[in-house]
Image (cartoon, rainbow, N blue to C red):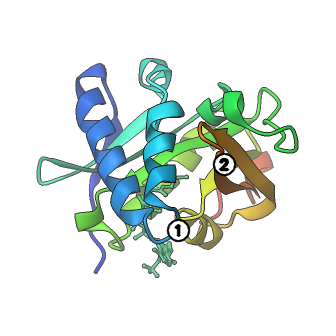
Amino acid sequence: MTTIPDIRVATRADRDALRALQETSFRELGLAYYDEDVIESFITHVGTMDDALIDDGTFFVAVLDGLTVGCGGWSVRTPNYAAHATEDTPVPARPAATVRSIFVDPAFARRGIARRVMARVEAEIAAAGFERASLGATLSGVPLYRRTGYRSRGPLVVRLPHELLFVGIRMEKRFAHARTGLAPAA
Ligand SMILES: CC(C)(COP(=O)(O)OP(=O)(O)OC[C@H]1O[C@@H](n2cnc3c(N)ncnc32)[C@H](O)[C@@H]1OP(=O)(O)O)[C@@H](O)C(=O)NCCC(=O)NCCS
């Protein structure tokens, strides 16, 4: 079933609801890919969102019937995980556009909400003049990103306290029509 949410720019008033949604999403949908202690440690020590993106106006909320059901954004700011990444995990060089914090409420998963958030985020990245986007994918996010045209660039490893490791994949997409200013490929 496909559901069509409104996608709007997030404001500071959305922050708590967004964080709650992100944590619920990662706890439930991430559990098929990560141990519970890794998810909890990641939430505590790395975090699911950088509030600065809200202030930058580059973070978006998916709203359905008044409910916050998804979110995501982009930035040229260094991702949160970078401070914890191992030496063999290169951090995107500025000013690379990075897709950030794509999350969907588990109750609304697999209805095309993340795909719509991604379309908005990529349109904004292209409108800002970038020809490609990169991201640090959780393993739970990889099927979505592959489906939306991202390709693997290597591992992403984050060191967490008590010798826990969070493993993801660095991915990248070059926009098909970047030079012509048209919308990015789906
Ligand atoms: C990853 C996530 C954002 C996907 O959200 P979603 O709204 O369910 O995704 P969509 O419905 O838009 O999926 C679009 C396509 O991506 C692929 N896809 C998405 N989730 C998938 C899954 N769990 N398994 C297999 N393919 C999946 C499918 O091809 C899907 O198309 P289809 O449903 O027509 O087959 C959501 O599962 C989530 O929030 N996960 C936990 C948090 C997380 O890991 N976020 C990524 C941070 S980097």
SS type, badge 1: loop
**Which residue lies at the image location 23% right of the left edge and 36% below the top edge?**
17
**Which residue lies at the image location 84% right of the left edge and 40% below the top edge?**
90
Question: Could you tell which of marks 1 and 2 lies nearer the N-terminus?
Answer: 1
Inspect the image, locate mark 1, and give the three-letter code of the amino acid beneath it: Tyr
Determine if the C-beta at disc 1 is less than 8 A from ligand 1: yes
168 over 84 or under it: above or below: below
Which is nearer the eye, 86 or 154?
A: 86
**Which residue lies at the image location 68% right of the left edge and 33% below the top edge?**
84
SS type, badge 2: strand
Asked if one can make out residue 36 in the rendered structure from this viewpoint, the answer is yes
Asked if one can make out residue 129 in the rendered structure from this viewpoint, the answer is no
**Residue lying farthest bottom?**
1
Quadrant placement of the C terminus: bottom right
- Residue 68 located left or right of residue 163: left
In percent of width and height, residue 76 lies at 67, 28
Q: Of the residues tagged 1 and 2, which is closer to the observer?
A: 1
1 over 186 or under it: above or below: below
Spatial separation of the CA atoms under disc 1 and disc 2: 15 Å
Q: Residue 136 bears which disc, if any?
A: 2
Determine if the C-beta at disc 2 is less than 8 A from ligand 1: yes
- Residue 16 located left or right of residue 110: left
Q: Residue 33 bears which disc, if any?
A: 1
* Label 2 neighbour load within 10 Å: few <14, some 14-19, many 20+: many
**Which residue lies at the image location 49% right of the left edge and 61% below the top edge?**
35
**Residue lying farthest right?**
88
Q: How many marks?
A: 2
* Label 1 neighbour load within 10 Å: few <14, some 14-19, many 20+: few
